[in-house]
Amino acid sequence: MIDTPPRLDGVDLHALAAQVGTPTYVYSASAIRDRIQALQHALKGLDTRVCYAVKANANLAVLQLMAEQGVGADIVSVGELRRALRAGIPASRIVYSGVGKTADEIAEAIGMGVWRYNVESHDELRTLQAVAAGRGATVRASARINPDVDAGTHAKISTGKSENKFGVSIDEARHWFAEAAQYPNVRLDGLHAHIGSQILSIKPFRLALQRVAAFARELAGQGRELNCIDVGGGLGVRYRQDQAPPLTPDQYAAMLRETFADFHGRLILEPGRYLVAEAGWLLTRVIRVKPGQQRAFLVVDAAMNDLLRPALYDAWHDIVPLHGRDAETVEYDVVGPVCETGDTFAVRRPMPACRAGDLIAIAGAGAYGAAMASTYNSRPLPAEVLLDRDRYAVVRRRQDYDAMIADECPVQEWSTA
Ligand code: LLP
């Protein structure tokens, strides 16, 4: 939480914004550590490995915090692999997920010694076998099951229904295990399921994982004892302070204990949002207050290119003015400078009246914020700052205009292919 006067992790946000400018993402290292510890505490006594879903926030400093706490990584690209390794997460704690792994990517991951592969199609299984055989390696793999469960979350972040592109049916996975001898370089000894993100009730998790657990029992009955079950990520977080906190790690862990009571292998967890979302804020400054014909617009210097979630998912983020003045409550549409109506952080949001120059903090921005930023409208990528007990470090400097266009050039010569 931001204290009054506005401090986060002991750092004065006004002074910080004056030094690094806006828009800037700020992350509290203490809050991230607290989340990791809360989860690890809840999981005590269970044989688990937590592999942070790098996609949520791939900043090297955030990954470094994960490494320091013994957390591994769930990756979906070679780019994420390189980041995780660079930040000090050992390959032996990295699981590789995703429907579109190419042979080249698999080869690089094998070369780096990635721990496990979550396999999402028959073709991928054959590719994994071929690449591993070509390198004289044996790799460990889990079959990603699509349990056909509705996660009850936004359609664009649901992944566990049969119409989604992720995973395979239990029926198909059954065939993979039956023909495992055809894949001598793949030790298929695990299952994986991830049904979606920002899940706020235990029910869909329980339903999906019961299906996975039943399949694991079936395989064990045939003498195929599994080593690992990867239960994915998806734990929801609180985006509105005026609403009850969602699922707790204790409730989640209790569900795992119950569902996997008779499973003797290791459980892998892939939380992303839970570990970082509420630890991050997007600091932005009011450019001007524009009285519209029907609404008052608060035009801020952050935009949809910096934080896409409201435009893409109609996602709610709390918005907190940090001016500290006594001010009447007014309703604003909080908008950015990008030339799209969708560049709107909030509609008719009641908040203390603001003026040009005021500093504002957008909450819940630690996950899928900077990670999904772009330079749309030729706006350079925002800065990112890690805060830790009264100190701060700029962990991504604001992109400058030259860097933004550095990889482009006007045509100098034409080639033929
Ligand atoms: N594991 C797999 C295989 C995933 O696909 C994901 C997220 C996770 C773990 C982590 O899920 P989490 O614990 O963060 O819910 N951009 C969207 C979220 C997309 C999530 C994609 N996959 C958003 O801003 O809400």
Image (cartoon, rainbow, N blue to C red):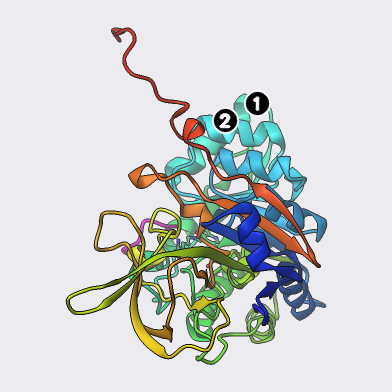
Rate crowding at label 1 as few (under 14), some (14 to 19) or many (20 or more) other CA atoms within 10 Å: few
Quarter-of-image position of residue 7: bottom right
Image mark count: 2
Q: Left or right? Give the position of 38 relative to 375.
A: right
Kindly identify which residue carries mark 1: 135
Distance from label 2 to label 1 (Cα)?
6 Å
Answer yes or no: do the residues labelled 2 and 1 have beta carbons within 8 Å?
yes
Q: Residue at (47%, 80%) from the top-left corner?
A: 204
Front position in the image: 398 or 316: 398
The quadrant the C terminus occupies is top left
Amino acid under disc 1 = Arg
Q: Is residue 124 above or below residue 144?
A: above
Q: Is residue 400 above or below residue 135?
A: below
Q: Residue at (64%, 87%) from the top-left corner?
A: 251
Is residue 223 among what the camera can see? no
Q: Left or right? Give the position of 185 relative to 339.
A: right
The span picked out in magenta is 163-168
Q: Is residue 146 above or below residue 251?
A: above
Q: Residue at (77%, 54%) from the top-left corner?
A: 67
Amino acid under disc 2 = Val
Q: Position of residue 40 (x, y in %)?
A: 77, 73
Quarter-of-image position of residue 303: bottom left
- Which mark, by number, is residue 131? 2
Magenta stretch, main secondary structure, is loop
